[in-house]
Image (cartoon, helix red, strand yellow):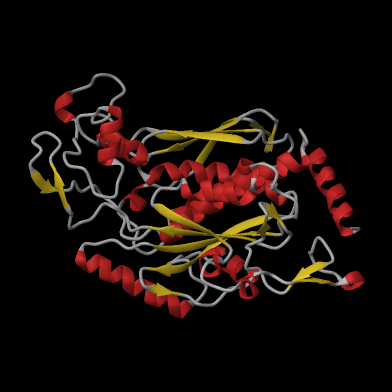
Amino acid sequence: MLRFCTAGESHGEALIAVISGIPAGIEIDQEFVNHELWRRQQGYGRGGRMRIERDTAHFISGVRHGKTIGSPISLRIENRDWKNWEEVLPVGAGDPAKHKRVASPRPGHADLAGALKYNLPEARYVLERASARESTARVAVGAVAKLLLKSIEVEVLSHVIAVGKASSDGIPDWEQVQALARKEEVLLGCVDAEAEQRMKAEVDQALRTGDSVGGIFEVIGHHVPPGLGTYANWDERLDAQLAAAVMSLQAVKAVEIGRGVTAAVSFGSQVHDAIGYAGEKNGGDRFTRFTRARNNAGGIEGGISNGEDVVVRGYLKPISTLRRPLESVDFATREPVKAAYERSDVCVVPAAGVAAEAMVALTLARAALEKFGGDSAGEFERNYKSYCKQIAEY
């Protein structure tokens, strides 16, 4: 079974990730992995941390001569800011006078709930682990999952459809999303240039007022074969797994599969994707001769992928660290004060989309391994091709 975990703190020495269950023989393109990390750092409205870090993944185990060897893969991502925090967050006792307290909890962050849960006198250690810096490690292991999916011709990418009140109404095709991912300069990750400028204006307003702004990103799993997931058990439904995976990202407060939100206020005749049959005329990269006129279901019906693109939207709340802080309470005195301020971003919607790509890729990779099996890349690919032949002949 494909599993992963991450370790490390926002201002600690490094982030660590371990992923197990990847078959032997998958080629690991380190340049691709590092480019995924670069993509996570881009976007208008990012904070000063992005000028410090230049994230790269150092593979420690599980990869030899450029290919996976079937054992757990571990990797390390250096925190370049560590030199400024080494005496503040030492592993040993250190000098308590150099500790930087988070004296008042930030509304919307894990500060207060975490301090209560772990019986901590203030929120420094909560901030260090709850920070979205942790998603860097997820992007690295997600890149490994993408390389596995590439062996069965599945790709995962994202784009931004809203920042604040500015949104793009159009539905881009796959080629537009691919072109967006190839850009060397990232503004706000929207395929619609005019809408992207309106999104930029939303970020500019937040910058002027010391505020922050959220938005909506959409992740697309392209060329996902039908049959991943199942309706047989609640925790094996593909849509449930995807929703949990994307919801696990910092600041995501809602997840939508396909056009689920619109579907809730529409008639069934407007929502469900009518089925056709192309017969021998079927071609292109379709798996079956059954066709759909649209994809409101987001590629999943009854908890199972149906051969259409898998589409998942994440709704991201505004970052909770504000340059004009909200009211809070001092941990020590219980007196009213302003919430603590820590260097932060104003808008992270494009970056959240990249992190969500990683979580979707990991979820699809796990489902594909459960469906097709295989301890080596060759066995995995043969099982996949055999299954594709079966459904093409259905």
Q: Residue at x 91, y 58 (%)?
A: 393
- Where does the image place residue 268, in percent across and percent down from the top left? 62, 71
Task: Tell me the quarter of the image containing the N terminus.
Answer: top right
Hey, which residue is sitting farthest bottom in the picture?
194
Confirm whether residue 357 shows in the render.
yes
Task: Tell me the quarter of the image containing the C terminus.
Answer: bottom right
Confirm whether residue 34 shows in the render.
no
Q: Residue at x 72, y 74 (%)?
A: 293
Q: Is residue 218 left or right of residue 196?
A: right
Question: Where 377 sits versus 151, above or below?
Answer: above
Hey, which residue is sitting farthest front in the picture?
267
Q: Quadrant of residue 302?
A: bottom right
- Where does the image place residue 219, in percent across and percent down from the top left? 56, 59
Judging depth in this view, the residue of 299 and 233 nearest the camera is 233
Question: Where 87 sits versus 140, above or below?
Answer: above
Q: Is residue 100 left or right of residue 132?
A: left
Question: Where 333 sits versus 312, above or below?
Answer: above
Judging depth in this view, the residue of 196 and 251 nearest the camera is 251
- Where does the image place residue 316, in percent across and percent down from the top left? 40, 58
- Where does the image place residue 33, in percent across and percent down from the top left? 57, 47
Q: Quadrant of residue 209?
A: bottom left
Q: Residue at x 25, y 35 (%)?
A: 124
Judging depth in this view, the residue of 162 and 88 nearest the camera is 162
Question: Where 16 sits versus 105, above or below?
Answer: above
Judging depth in this view, the residue of 325 and 257 nearest the camera is 257
Q: Quadrant of residue 28?
A: top right
Q: Residue at x 19, y 35 (%)?
A: 100
